[in-house]
Amino acid sequence: MVTKKMLKTNRLPSVWFHGIDADKKEEFESAIRNSTVALSSLYTIMELYLDELESREFSEKSFESPAWANLQAFYLGQKKSIHKMMYLIEGVARPNG
């Protein structure tokens, strides 16, 4: 879990290093931190996906579905996943921020 303290110190969450050998962590972290252009782009794309999901989630058509609760759960799950990924990127690269 990413904490406010990690974001203040600009430390990467440990999940970034899952499966990375201890002697390769520094090199791997450097590669991530040098990927700000790609990560900023990815962050922007995820923002667009969130906007699209919210548009679909709150459209009148979605309320017509007899399985409305299941549809809402689906949208919430997708949004939560996107937010998790955005949170990981925020410590490295964030457009306009």
Image (cartoon, rainbow, N blue to C red):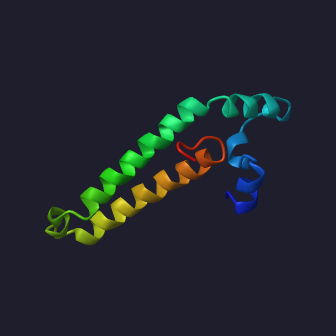
| Residue 83 pos. (x, y %) | 50, 55
Compared with residue 19, is residue 66 higher up or lower down, i.e. above or below? below
Looking at the picture, tell me which residue is in the foreground, 47 or 15.
47
Q: Which residue is drawn at 75% across and 30% down?
A: 30
Please identify the quarter of the rendering in which residue 36 is found: top right
Please give left or right for residue 65 compared with residue 79 in the image.
Answer: left
At a point 48% along the width and 54% down the height, the residue shown is: 81
Q: Residue 23 or 39: which is nearer the viewer?
A: 39
**Farthest front residue?**
96
Horizontal side of 90 relative to 53 (left or right) equals right
**Residue 18 visible to the viewer:** no
Residue drawn at the location 70% of the way across and 61% of the way down? 4
Residue that sits furthest to the right in the current view:
23
Q: Is residue 8 left or right of residue 93?
A: right
Quadrant hosting residue 7: bottom right
Q: Is residue 57 above or below residue 10?
A: below
| Residue for point 67% across, 57% down | 2
User: Residue 22: x, y in percent?
Assistant: 84, 35
State whether residue 95 appears in this view. yes
Image quarter for residue 8?
bottom right
Q: Residue 49 placed where, x, y %?
A: 37, 47
Instruction: Measuring from the top left, give residue 1's x and y in whole percent.
Output: 67, 58
